[in-house]
Image (tube, helix red, strand yellow):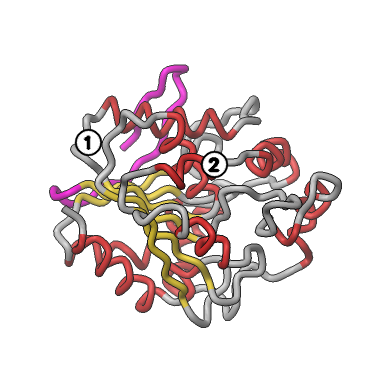
Amino acid sequence: MTIKLRDGKRLNIHREGNGIPLVMIHGFGGYQQIWTDQWPLIDQLSLMGISYDLRDHGASSRDPHLTKVRTLVDDLAEFLQSYQLDRPILMGHSMGASIIYGLMQLYPEIDLRGVIAIDQSPKMISSPTWAYGYCGATRANYRLLLQTRGNVSETYQGLDSKVLNQLAIVKAQFPFDRRDHLPLLYDHARQDWRAGLVTTTTPTLLVTGQHSPYFNGDFVEVLKAQNACLQHVVVRQSGHCPMAEQPAIFNEAIRNFIQSLD
């Protein structure tokens, strides 16, 4: 199915179930099929699972003018408000987590049951007071690091074969040109969403990969010291994509968190 946005663009959406809504948001250059291993858990917990391709990603509408992550935050807010989802749980990976951080900060009136953010620092550029940027990026070198992905492998031991198979299909159908989208990536990197996290009253689980090539997971402990609503799970033997690298371990952590919510 698709939904039409304020400017006529359409988001490609997959929905299953009829329970508490769980909305899943993939990252930069990604596809909603990254959540392949989470659908069995959604069924077991009797949730309403909703995944979608971001604007200008996957099967959603092309948008050659997409250069701001705020547009993606607004898309999420519009979707949640238009469909009147009752206190949804949001789960985002990488830039998808940043989109959720942005929603929490810019749309505090949207009532969320819970948030799950996967391997994403709320501030990607390091500074004298924040040592948890992307690969240690600074204002001087963040563009170069993002162009080269820090010359590291995104995963620790590769993705689960079921996820790889699903991704191979959609990548062939809807290829993503990273270079064409660098302005969006640069804008994503320049954001600072810490204020929304340290003030939120929404139960929020921050998941990090033990071997993430991009982020030092200690950033969560710094934030937790400022807000008791934040929780932290480290997925062992995982890189940047724990939900697809170690799905059994990840799903158990998500199960425990969701079952703890009101």
Q: Secondary structure at mark 1?
A: loop
Disc 2 to disc 1, how far (Cα)?
A: 24 Å
Nearer to me, 98 or 37: 98
Residue in view at x 34 percent, y 54 percent: 229
* Label number found at residue 242: none
Q: Amino acid at mark 1?
A: Leu
How far from the left and from the top, in percent, is residue 28? 58, 48
- What residue does disc 1 label? 85
- What residue does disc 2 label? 193
How far from the left and from the top, in percent, is residue 14? 32, 46
Q: Amino acid at mark 2?
A: Trp
The answer to whether any part of residue 166 appears in the image is: yes
In this rendering, the answer to whether 198 lies above or below 34 is: above
Residue in view at x 53 percent, y 76 percent: 238
Membership of 16 in magenta stretch: yes
> In the image, 199: left or right of 253?
right
Nearer to me, 156 or 257: 257
How far from the left and from the top, in percent, is residue 262? 16, 53
> In the image, 152: left or right of 88?
right
Q: Secondary structure at mark 2?
A: loop
Q: Which residues are magenta?
A: 1-20
How far from the left and from the top, in percent, is residue 167? 50, 60
Instruction: Say which of marks 2 and 1 sits in front.
Output: 2
Instruction: Give the quarter of the figure containing the N terminus.
Output: top left
Residue in view at x 67 percent, y 53 percent: 130
Crowd tier of the residue under label 2, counting other residues whose Cα lies within 10 Å: few below 14, some 14–19, many 20 or above:
many
Residue in view at x 31 percent, y 32 percent: 110
The disc, 2 or 1, on the residue closer to the chain's N-terminal end is: 1
Kindly indicate the quadrant of the structure image that contains residue 12.
Answer: top left
Looking at the image, how many numbered discs can be counted on the residues?
Answer: 2
Crowd tier of the residue under label 1, counting other residues whose Cα lies within 10 Å: few below 14, some 14–19, many 20 or above:
some
